[in-house]
Image (cartoon, grey):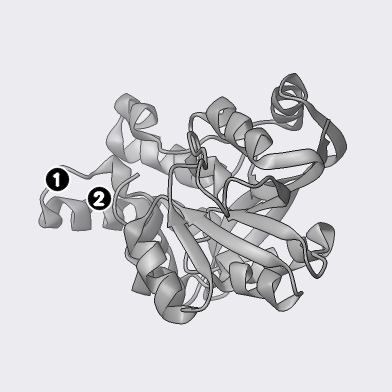
Amino acid sequence: MSAWDAARYQDQHSFVWRYGANLMESLNPQPGERILDVGCGTGQLTAEIARSGATVAGLDNSAEMLAEARRNYPDLAFVLADAASFHFTEPPLSKPFDAVFSNAALHWVKDAEGAVKSIARALRTSGRFVAEFGGKGNIASVQAALGDVLGPGADERSPWYYPSVGEYTALLERHGFEIRDAHLFDRPTPLQGEDGMANWLRMFTGSYWRELPPDRVDDIVRQLVDHLRPILYHDGIWTVDYRRLRVQCVRH
């Protein structure tokens, strides 16, 4: 995907990794384990895994995010790679991992099969995969507004993959995973401040207007905010309509 504004992400959208702290209980990292954090962003959850005593590496395809992660946690290992095609051939990363963890990242990977293959390849037999990301129906109101404002071509510019439980578990099973838990749930998520929705749109929907001049982008964002206000703005708070898919599985 396009370059991230890592500073804005860390400052205004910390909810992304803060919600992931709950997922850490499902991972239950143990001292001495080797764990890979796929889509590590600016590294907060990678560091949380490290505090358990596990040896952890963070992986992301954004050089901007990884630069911020390395500033935040200079003692941790971070690697630039694509979640859909990573394959480690040099030690120590080439040694199979005990677990792969991913929070709020895999819905950005449209080649979902490539990601599942890469994750399975990185795991030892009986290694576990714990992930949470956007699922079917995620940000439905935002997607509808994008279609209304940008027209029928909007779907072609979508950078997201939002599978159903059945779709994703079938994919996992085809590549050697045994499902231990998989569920889809609503997570209405409040945004910061009166400009919360405009900031969110600028952070996460840039693929829809990458080639447009700034004044046109400003106009589109205003139109989107106007469309969404009656739906997502209540009592002075913007709340985005997230739905999350959480999976726990083990590689055969």
The residue drawn where x is 73% and y is 19% is 174
Nearer-the-camera pick, 150 or 172: 172
Looking at the rendered structure, the number of numbered marks drawn on it comes to 2
The quadrant of the rendering that contains the N terminus is top left
Whether residue 237 appears in this view of the structure is yes
Nearer-the-camera pick, 51 or 93: 93
The residue drawn where x is 69% and y is 24% is 171
The residue drawn where x is 33% and y is 63% is 64
Nearer-the-camera pick, 96 or 198: 96
Q: Quadrant of residue 70?
A: bottom left
Residue 114, x across and y down, in percent:
54, 28
- Label 2 or label 1, whichever lies nearer to me, is 1
Residue 82, x across and y down, in percent:
44, 42
Q: Quadrant of residue 71?
A: bottom left
Against 248, is 161 above or below?
Answer: above
Against 53, is 106 above or below?
Answer: above
Distance from disc 2 to disc 1, alpha carbons, whole Å, reads 10 Å
The quadrant of the rendering that contains the C terminus is top right
Residue sitting farthest toward the front: 91
Q: What is the number of the mark on residue 244?
A: none
Q: Amino acid at mark 1?
A: Leu
Q: Amino acid at mark 2?
A: Ile
Q: Is residue 10 left or right of residue 32?
A: left
Q: Is residue 163 left or right of residue 126?
A: left
Per the image, label 2 sits on a secondary structure element best described as helix
> What residue does disc 2 label?
220
> What residue does disc 1 label?
212
Q: Quadrant of residue 197?
A: bottom left
- Do the residues bearing badges 2 and 1 touch, measured as CB atoms within 8 Å? yes
Per the image, label 1 sits on a secondary structure element best described as loop
